[in-house]
Image (cartoon, rainbow, N blue to C red):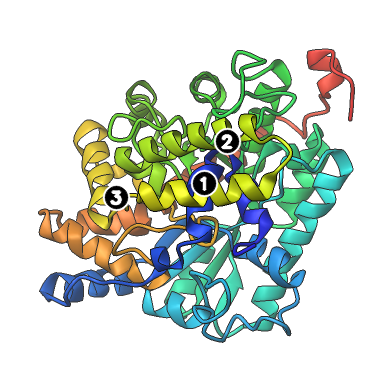
Amino acid sequence: MFYPFGILKKYCFILPFLLFVLFNPDNITATSPQNDEHLEQARAILKEVPLIDGHNDVPMQYRARVNYNLDKLDFAEDLSTVDPPMHTDIDRLRKGLVGAQFWSVYVSVDYKGSEAVQATKEQIDFVHLLNERYPDTFELALTAADVERIFAEGKIASLIGMEGGHSINNSLPVLRQFYELGARYMTITHWRNTDWADSATDDPEHNGLTEFGKEVIREMNRLGMLVDLSHVAPKTMYDALDVTEAPVIFSHSSAYSVTRHIRNVPDDVLNRLPDNGGVVMVTFVPPFISDEVRLYSEKQDRERNRLLREHPDNENLVRNKLAEWRQQNPAPRSTLEQVADHIDYIRDLIGVEHIGIGSDYDGITTVPKGLEDVTKFPYLFAELLRRGYSENELKKIAGLNVLRVMRETERVAERLQQERGPSQASIEELDGAESN
């Protein structure tokens, strides 16, 4: 298989579209806009403020490829030349002027209970190993002040984001221990529901958050852990916004009104962010930013399901026939400009103060034209300059908005820790559920 299986499972709800890439490596061939004064201006801006990327799946790549062994896959080498190519390595992060990176410590929703807890710990351990192996490049950041200090010292701030509430195994003590290990956001669900929250890509079970789910949000506020609402159902977004006392983030989502993908943020939720203070970190995931790509993915999904019904016991035949279908129906490509369109839309609706960047590099197998890897961040900011954004607006989008959210979350946590101790609630007590 051309791409590690773990990546396909991460986005299995868009699996048919991703399969196209398995047979089309040209989809990750780099192309770039011409160097111009806007690009130089963008680079200058990103040297002044830390570009904070909300989501990168390098830890998952290392699990799938080499079982986390940095001796077998040196992050200081050019990983665009490995098979299949990665989007990220140290040199390219430097060229892309990344100032702070939330590393996603994602584990599949197929992991259950203590197995999910262990796998998440292993992902977090890898981030710590990365920092220890390359101390001149990375340093763990736990606060907004850490990010600013590490950036000022010329290094990249490493932040840890947990992708999916299944990682805590329905346990607030486990949530607290992940915070102690350095996790500074948690995505409430991944592509399936948890026992206490509905996902955007699963059939609703809880009408949003259960009582225990609401307690998870309260405990995250008390700890100072960012509440990440990417992946969750709209009703879960609403419930979380009703409960939280701190700003929320969407670590890798875009605007539903621009691209009607179920993983994007609808207007009624966006309109609540000014009062909450939260940030949508606009993503580069092609079906999330291009309706043409989204519709192609759905069409391919229907064809794949038809072939599976006709040939349920012949996976090779299904694969070959689907490859023939793709040759007859070439896939469209998303673009850097479409990512900028999502930024435009959110700015016009609720203001530039609620926008960040959440690429999902190395968690996606196909990329927008012009955003082929982590070196291309400055090109997106150059496009925004061409569209009339001011330097101050770009500084907010790059990182100042996320730093504001982090500081406010830290202030809320400091207050709440004076008001109450760690929650002793359990899912059995609040929801009447059985423990895993």
Q: Is mark 3 on a helix, strand or loop?
A: helix
Give the side of residue 13 with respect to residue 383, left or right.
right
* Mark 3 residue crowding within 10 angstroms, few (<14) / some (14–19) / many (20+): many
Q: Which amino acid does label 1 sit on?
A: Leu
* Mark 1 residue crowding within 10 angstroms, few (<14) / some (14–19) / many (20+): many
Give the side of residue 211 with respect to residue 242, left or right.
right
From the top left corner, tell me how far across and down residue 82 is, in percent: 57, 79
Q: Distance between the residues labelled 2 and 1?
A: 8 Å
- Check disc 2 and report the residue beneath it: 307
Residue 105 appears in the picture as rendered:
no
* Mark 2 residue crowding within 10 angstroms, few (<14) / some (14–19) / many (20+): some
- Check disc 3 and report the residue beneath it: 339
- Check disc 1 and report the residue beneath it: 322
Work out whether mark 2 precedes mark 1 in sequence or the reverse, and give the earlier one.
2
Work out whether mark 3 precedes mark 1 in sequence or the reverse, and give the earlier one.
1
Residue beneath the point at 89% across and 20% down:
434
Q: What residue type is labelled 2?
A: Leu
From the top left corner, tell me how far across and down residue 325 is, in percent: 44, 46
Work out whether mark 2 precedes mark 3 in sequence or the reverse, and give the earlier one.
2
Q: Which amino acid does label 3 sit on?
A: Val
Give the total of numbered labels.
Answer: 3
CB contact under 8 Å: marks 2 and 3: no
From the top left corner, tell me how far across and down residue 109 is, in percent: 72, 40
Residue beneath the point at 34% across and 72% down:
30
Q: What element carries label 2?
A: helix
Residue beneath the point at 79% across and 15% down:
430
Number of the front mark, 2 or 3? 2
CB contact under 8 Å: marks 2 and 1: yes
